Image (cartoon, rainbow, N blue to C red):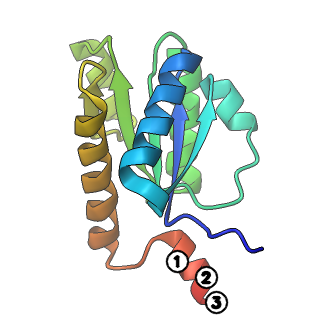
Amino acid sequence: MVKALAKWHILIIDNDPAAALVTARGLQRLLTSDIEVTIAESAQAALNLNIETPLDLLIIDPSPQLQATSALISKVRSDSPKTTILVFTGHDTPRLRKHMNGLGVQHYLNKSVNIQQLSTTVSTLLTEASDNVSLEPPIARLLAQ
């Protein structure tokens, strides 16, 4: 049996494993088979992952490890500049936004949103990303080869 590959690959980084799991399962349920979700409990753990498919969306809660988060975002920006980054935090501050903006992050969402609102935002970001480059998602390009 051949496993169907997901259309989009999302990495969720949250130091709260329960929150990360709820987020991942909610997105998988609402976006169905269009996504593959990987979870990491910290930015450092994400740096150690061996992810073989291109990353389309990084959803990250930058607290409490801002330095490791900054290093990860810089690496993602360098290795995969087309990856969309969404800061998903319950501790949004002007200082955090300024710091994240300096790293090229443009999308923010407060954790007070429900999973349906998050799903809509994720779907919109992924669609915009593919529209902006006028290409299919990375995994679709691999399948076409």
Question: Dot 2 surroundings within 10 Å: few (below 14), some, or many (20 or more)?
Answer: few
Rounded to the nearest angstrom, the CA distance separating label 1 from label 2 is 5 Å
Q: Which residue is drawn at 54% across and 56% down?
A: 80
Amino acid type of the residue tagged 1 in the rendering? Ala
Q: What element carries label 2?
A: helix
Residue 67: name its quadrant. top right
Q: Are marks 1 and 2 in contact (CB under 8 Å)?
A: yes
For image coordinates 26% across by 29% down, the residue present is 109
Tell me residue 58's x, y (percent).
Answer: 47, 42
Which mark is on residue 46?
A: none
**Residue depicted at x 32% and y 47%:** 122
Locate the C terminus and report the quarter of the image it occupies.
bottom right
Mark drawn on residue 145: 3
Q: Nearer the viewer, residue 2 or 13?
A: 2
Most foreground residue, 130 or 98: 130
Amino acid, disc 3: Gln
Task: Say left or right for 138 vs 86.
Answer: right
Q: Is residue 6 above or below residue 145?
A: above
Measured as percent of width and height from the top left, residue 33 is found at 49, 60
Residue assigned mark 2: 143
What residue is shown at x 71% (from left), y 58% (from top)?
Answer: 52
**Is disc 2 in contact with disc 3, using a CB cutoff of under 8 Å?**
yes
Does the rendering let one see residue 88?
yes
- Residue 101: % across, % down: 30, 33
Left or right of 4, for residue 11? left
Say left or right for 113 vs 13: left
Judging by the rendered image, the residue that carries numbered circle 1 is 140
Query: Compared to 132, does 105 lie above or below?
Result: above
Q: Of the residues shown, which amino acid type is indicated by label 2?
A: Leu
